[in-house]
Amino acid sequence: MSFTLPLGEGTIDVSLPDCEVTVADPPGGEAVDVRAAAENAVADPHGPSLAALADPDDLVTIVVTDVTRATPDDVLLDVLLGELERAGVPREQVTVLLGLGLHRPMTDAEIEDGLGEHADLAQNHDPDETVTVGTVDDCPIQVHERVADADLVVSTGMVEPHQYAGFSGGAKTVAIGAGGAPLIRYTHGPEMLAEEGVRLGRVDGNPFREAVDRAGDAVGLDFCLNVTHGPSGILAASAGRPRSVVQDLAAAGKEALSVPVTKAYDAVVAGVGAPKDANLYQATRAATYVVLGARNPLRSGGRVVIPAALPEGAGDGTGERRFYEWLAEAGSAESLYETMREGYEPGAQRAFVVARALRDHDVYVTDSDCPEIVEECLLSAAPTVADAIDPGSDVLVVPDALNTLLTE
């Protein structure tokens, strides 16, 4: 059987003639016009409108997502700025902060591509330029000074399946994306990630999600405009109070992205594509989403195969470098997992969950620009998907692994 998978900005054709192949295609939903959906959401928000919250004298900071999330921030930002202008807030009183967390800064070209005509308002978040604004569970909540000093804090976001938060978006864009190391260390530490409720696709009863939401309260996030997406494109938009926005869009996302799994497979081929296959740190999400989600579709000893371009290698940000160092210096997945259970630096959590997945399953990365880095990180490299799969295997293909929820 032949099928097509994403690779970077393009696609590859894969043929597995000696294998039994099942393709996991979620329902997908119906794409909407992003601008119209965003305008409707802002006009009918959860809670007070943005215009009602804004004052003409306000200094406003809008935190937007970074290059690792395919959020239509140019459109969302345009809608938000239009609403602020109608409320009497001049454009020059608005700062757009790129919510990097511990990821690398965005380049001028990336900022212009992501924000269009509003790129001149943007600056990269720097976790060293934060101030403490409160605590959550005795953890200091730090946020970029442009957020702390703002009279009105607004955010964009993509509500999509997330390994720890269940679904991303809401307060996470500000609390993590524009935050400091302490909250990242607390929420991404081994104790939090071992909590039963911390899992892909779960919002209610998820300690990670609850901590991030409370951190958003401490930061003072006033209003957010988020979207969710599926295979067909952007599916919906929602605006207003962050918790309600996440609940709203997570429900739409689950309906569009869930695929039931009824048996165990020898291999899962997990598609990623741009922007998440730019580096190994992001691309390994495909393996952990498959293995550590609601339903692991692999038999004992089965493998995950990920075609990923990896033009940035392991990744250039602080978190990405820590991820690489932990994996590259490890003797085995089991020893790494046990060592990291004692603690690790913020950003290194991806190495911890990768080690957790590797204890039971091999992970192959194919078609990459840097197979040597893949091999250094306890993973296996192969030239093509076909080279990574044994003849006669029973294979599940998940073309969009980061936006597919495998369920019972």
Image: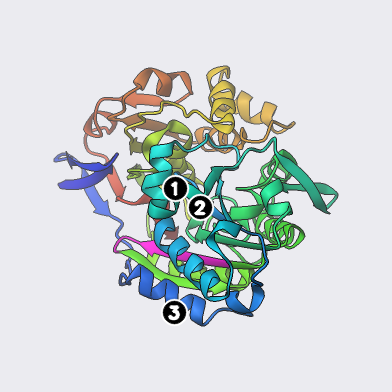
Q: Residues within 10 Å of mark 3 (few under 14, many from 20)?
A: some
User: Which residue is rendered at x = 24% and y = 30% of the image?
Assistant: 384
Position of 53 compared to 40: left or right?
right
Q: Image quadrant of residue 231?
A: bottom left
Can residue 155 be seen by looking at this rendering?
yes
* Nearest to N terminus: mark 2 or mark 3: 3
Q: Residues within 10 Å of mark 1 (few under 14, many from 20)?
A: many
Which range is magenta? 224-232
Position of 226 compared to 298: left or right?
right
Dot 2: element: loop
Position of 77 compared to 145: left or right?
left
State how far apart marks 2 and 3 are (Cα).
33 Å
Q: Which mark is residue 293?
A: 2
State how far apart marks 1 and 3 are (Cα).
35 Å
Q: Is residue 51 magenta?
A: no
- Note whether 19 is above or below 34 in the view shown: above
- Note whether 54 is above or below 128 in the view shown: below
Q: Image quadrant of residue 391?
A: top left
Characterize the magenta stretch by its predominant secondary structure.
strand
Cβ atoms at labels 2 and 1 below 8 Å apart: yes
Q: Which residue is mark 1?
A: 290
* Nearest to N terminus: mark 1 or mark 3: 3
State how far apart marks 2 and 1 are (Cα).
6 Å
Dot 3: element: helix
Q: Which mark is residue 40?
A: 3
User: Which residue is rendered at x = 27% and y = 33% of the image?
Assistant: 389
Residue 3, percent from left and from top: 18, 47
Of badges 1 and 3, the one in the foreground is 3
Residue 224, percent from left and from top: 57, 66
